[in-house]
Image: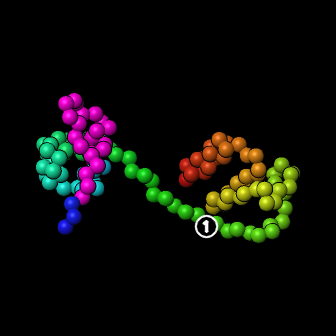
Amino acid sequence: MRSRQRTWAPPAGRRWTRADAEEMIVELAAAGGAIAPFAREHGINAQRVRWWRDRVAVREAPAVRFAPVRIVANAPHVADAGGGAHGTDAIEIAVGEVVVRVREGFDDSMLRRVLAALRSRP
């Protein structure tokens, strides 16, 4: 059986920081989560591992969800709420009943705020 390559080492000669503990928790999870063997392998006290594990909430990446995308070739020009026409220079993002039309030259910070507001809707 091939041994797993370690990527984390305990801090030497200084106090532990929260960042040290977060890195340790990630490594612990990658090692399978068993505290005693992990502590022995790294030469640290199992109680320290437990203490930090119980106090540090390591943020996990949120689950990625994909929405269906439909590409329509040669779509006709569509009039937007402002009365202007757009076609291939626009993107429409439909989230449930809401449709967001994004034209060429859009303000990306505004689009981020609009999409964040849509995500936070009940």
Nearer to the camera, 45 or 64: 45
- The kind of residue on which mark 1 rests is Pro
From the viewer's side, name the closer residue of 5 and 93.
5
Residue at left 27%, top 40%? 21
* In the image, residue 5 above or below residue 13: below
Q: Which residues are magenta?
A: 4-25
Indicate left or right for 34 with 19 as reference.
Answer: left
| Dominant SS type (magenta) | loop
Q: Is residue 57 visible?
A: yes
User: Is 16 within the magenta?
Assistant: yes
Q: Residue at x 12, y 49 (%)?
A: 40
Q: Is residue 71 magenta?
A: no
Secondary structure beneath dot 1 equals loop
The residue nearer to you, when weighing 18 against 68, is 18
Q: Quadrant of residue 9?
A: top left
Disc 1 designates what residue?
A: 68
- Point out residue 104 in the picture as x, y percentages from the top left corner: 76, 50
Identified at 23% across, 36% down, the residue is 11
Residue 15 vs 109, above or below: the answer is above
> Is 89 situated left or right of 5 in this image?
right
Query: Residue 112: where, in percent of width, then height?
Result: 62, 45
Q: Where is residue 22 drawn, in percent x and y?
A: 31, 43
Extreme residue in the top direction: 14
